Image (cartoon, rainbow, N blue to C red):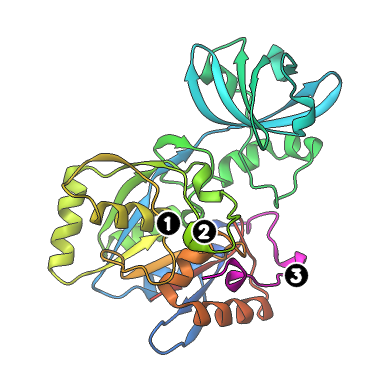
Amino acid sequence: MKLTDFDFVLPAERIARFPTDRRDESRLLVLDRKSGKITHATFKQLPDVLAADDFLVMNNSRVRPARLLGRIGGKAVEMLVVRNLGDKKVEVLCQPAKYFNLGAIFCGADGLEAEVLETGRRGRRLLLCNREYEQVLAQGYAPLPPYIKRKSAEAINYRSFDLERYQTIYARNAGSIAAPTAGLHFTPEVLARIRSSNPLLEITLEVGEATFQKIEAEDISRHRMGSEKIRIAAEVAHRILALKEQDKKLLAVGTTSVRALESYALLSEPCQEFDSDIFISPGFHFRMVDKLLTNFHLPRSSLFILAAAFAGQDLLQETYRQAIAQGYRFFSYGDAMLIV
């Protein structure tokens, strides 16, 4: 299939730069795959939309404050810390990359300094910092995607806000450099209502570069995802399989949960911690997931392609057209959709 098959035109005003005042005030579009029927609701109504035999599985990974702002030779720069290499060394994606030359010194807040030791392609650099990894991240900002435009001054003003709102309320296991955004809509009240009638289980996928990696191959079958770490506790896996055997319906909260669960289903033997580079596209046979709660995704992205594989390519495109016409808010800070 061609990458252009997964393109669509989105007006700039439909991109959400900020979340709704309350997490559960986001809108919720419910899509029935069999009938093609679309229902409009709000996220706080999710417990009412769930079927009695649904159970939810969500990604509890915690986002690290991995975005760093600073200067090199008086020029404003920023970088995303993607990997801790130990011994005060980190791997980063930087911009503008032209300033991160070999030997350049990045100067951040509170005396943070980092020297460029190695340069790579597409803004990738190896840096040696003057402090330990956790101390480096203490100066960090929420790693918002670039389409949520926050210039340096605005990023500083909204630092605390974004650190709170670009994080699920049930986040536990730090390790992600992007949020599992379908979970951003949940409030304690919504979770409590769901738990009162539907099982809710947690797994972990550390969201890395693979999730937002740009697809460059026109033939999507040639795309290769980067690897991400997954953890599914033995008792959670046993509960999931037991519920499936009882013919309960697994509702995955987010595409990262889908990838974790479907990766687990493909293991040759059970494993609690493993890496996966699974790329889900139309034609994929879903073995675990019956329903999907997700946000509205970027065109030509692996996330949109996964949703198309689950809902059906033509149906998803038509649903997106209707969502745009109805004024839904798109991407990480945007609204949600439930595909049943």
Q: What residue lies at 57% left-to-right and 78% top-to-bottom?
A: 317
Q: Residues within 10 Å of mark 3 (few under 14, many from 20)?
A: few
Return the residue at label 2: 302
| Image vertical order of residue 198 relative to residue 176, above or below | below
The secondary structure type at the circle numbered 3 is loop
The residues colored magenta run 1-21
Return the residue at label 3: 11
Q: Are marks 2 and 1 in contact (CB under 8 Å)?
A: yes
How far is the residue under mark 2 from the one under mark 1?
Answer: 7 Å
Looking at the magenta stretch, what is its main secondary structure? loop
Return the residue at label 1: 279
Say what amino acid the circle numbered 2 marks. Ser
Of tags 1 and 3, the one toward the viewer is 1
Q: Are marks 1 and 3 in contact (CB under 8 Å)?
A: no
Between residue 24 and residue 274, name the one nearer to us: 274
Say what amino acid the circle numbered 3 marks. Pro
Q: Upstream in the sequence, badge 1 or badge 3?
A: 3
- Counting from the top left corner in percent of width and height, residue 318 is at 57, 82
Q: Which mark is residue 149?
A: none
Q: Is residue 254 visible?
A: no
Q: Is residue 335 visible?
A: yes
The secondary structure type at the circle numbered 2 is helix
Q: Quadrant of the C terminus?
A: bottom left
How far is the residue under mark 2 from the one under mark 3?
Answer: 20 Å
Q: Upstream in the sequence, badge 2 or badge 3?
A: 3
- Counting from the top left corner in percent of width and height, residue 215 is at 58, 55
Q: What residue lies at 72% left-to-right and 13% top-to-bottom?
A: 103
